[in-house]
Amino acid sequence: FAVDGIAIRKFKNLESRGVPYPKDQPMRVYSSLWNADDWATRGGLVKTDWSQAPFTASYRNFKASACVWSSGSSSCGSSSQSSNSLWLNQDVDLNGGKNLKWVQKNYMIYNYCTDAKRFPQGFPPECNTA
């Protein structure tokens, strides 16, 4: 999954090792608004007027390169070779891997593959792959 050309999430297809892969279901993208009056509004000088809530936001120049899931099937199909679906088989290159590690270090809040309390009997199989 990439934003502005930077990989932010990678989930390898390891079905051959028994790891389920979410290829037959839709993916959703969610975003959040958060209270940043202590740093984003002239260093906290301008406070949010909460009486004006609810607040709405929109995306500008949003372009999704994805398969469309409808009525139980994907627009890409399993053997599709159209130029729109070539990204399905692309891997993250060396530079993309460095960017992914940077994003994870600076923005990832939670990684279930490091949560030993959640998985005291051992991590899920996808966590143990290189």
Image (cartoon, helix red, strand yellow):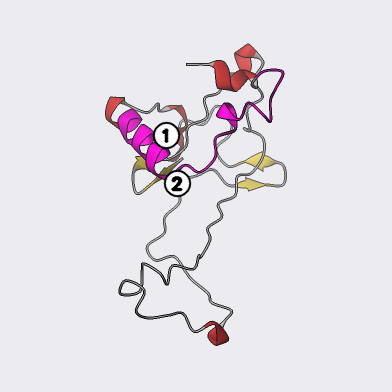
Q: Amino acid at mark 1?
A: Trp
List x then y, in percent, for residue 48: 46, 80
Q: Which mark is residue 87?
A: 1
Is residue 104 found inside the magenta-colored segment of the image?
A: yes
Mark closer to the chain start, 2 or 1:
2
Residue depicted at 58% across the width and 42% down the height: 75
List x then y, in percent, for residue 89: 45, 27
Q: Would you name the residue on which mark 2 appears? A: 65
Residue depicted at 37% across the width and 62% down the height: 61
Is residue 120 shown left or right of residue 103? Answer: right
Segment colored magenta: 96-122
List x then y, in percent, for residue 53: 57, 81
Q: Amino acid at mark 2?
A: Ser
Residue depicted at 34% across the width and 37% down the height: 102
Give the quadrant of residue 119.
top right
Residue that extends furthest to the bottom in the rendered view of this protein: 51
From the viewer's side, name the closer residue of 11 and 107: 107
Query: How much space separates mark 2 and mark 1, taking CA atoms?
Result: 9 Å
